[in-house]
Amino acid sequence: MNFFLKNKYNILFLLLIVLLICLCILNLSNINLLYKTIICFVLFVITIIIIYQNILKSYKIDFEKNVEKRTKQIQYALDELEKVNFKLYELAHTDFLTKIMNRRSFFLHAQNLFDKCHKQHCFLNIVMIDLDNFKKINDTYGHNIGDQVLVLFTQNIQKNINDNVLFGRLGGEEFALVYKNISLEHTINEVEKLRQNIEKASLVTHNGIINITASFGISDNSRVENIDEMLQKADKHLYNAKHSGKNLIRSRLSLI
């Protein structure tokens, strides 16, 4: 029956067939007129019901197709919005050159870790890092080579820390790390491994080989009230490392 009800012309055709059937019934002489009328009425009612059901079914199919189409459009829009939001988040929280945390993002995460460790009484260590002689590299080889040195340094650090360690660029040649749940002594040992790996790294240029070293200042969360005190102490130890010969690690323990 659906074959005859695909469009309005088929519906009219069906009605015409039913009408002809009714005329034929009415012309029969061996059936009472009342019965003829009832039979024709029933045929028309059944026909109207079939037509109505098929029209509803057609509307339902069209409605479901439109809903499915709209759902796909909305889902696509949501997926695109999610991609845009992710890109915006990256732009707001990632350093454009090294692709690690920028200053703002690093301090936000460091503050959160400090707050958690303050409540849970766990170890927290901040490492301030400054590349040695970076201004001289820029002045001698140019800022493009200087950028390559920063990227090489960043990649070297990333390969030698796990996912639990925060790593961010504070600006210029200044970087920072945050170690959680390990002691100051353990942190110093881990940073010493980093220092040695950086010391082995070099960048080959047309004007020669550039060797890289860095100085480190480490502070822990013992006897401090906030993250700013930790940062100030780490910066003070870094200053001491820079003025004690560079390529050194300094902390309150001065183990290395």
Image (cartoon, rainbow, N blue to C red):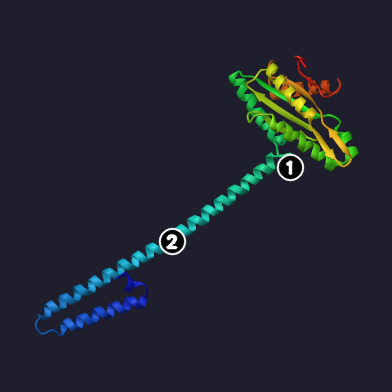
In what quadrant of the picture does the N terminus appear? bottom left
Q: Residue at x 77, y 25 (%)?
A: 196
Residue 228 visible in this rendered orientation of the protein: no
Residue 219: numbered disc: none
Q: Residue at x 16, y 78 (%)?
A: 37
Choose top left, top right, bottom left or bottom right for residue 175. Answer: top right
Q: Secondary structure at mark 1?
A: loop
Note whether 128 is above or below 150 in the view shown.
above
**Disc 2 packing (10 Å; few <14; some 14–19; many ≥20):** few
The type of residue carrying mark 2 is Lys
The location of residue 185, given as percent across then percent down, is 70, 16
What whole-number distance in Å separates the C-alpha atoms at marks 2 and 1? 44 Å
Residue 130 visible in this rendered orientation of the protein: yes
Note whether 91 is above or below 68 in the view shown.
above
The residue under label 1 is 96
In what quadrant of the picture does the C terminus appear? top right
Viewer-closest of 213 and 105? 213
The residue under label 2 is 65
The location of residue 235, given as percent across then percent down, is 78, 24
The type of residue carrying mark 1 is Phe
Horizontal arrangement in the rendering, residue 89 relative to residue 173 (left or right)? left
Note whether 65 is above or below 96 in the view shown.
below
Q: Earlier in the sequence, mark 2 or mark 1?
A: 2
The location of residue 229, given as percent across then percent down, is 73, 22
Choose top left, top right, bottom left or bottom right for residue 192. Answer: top right
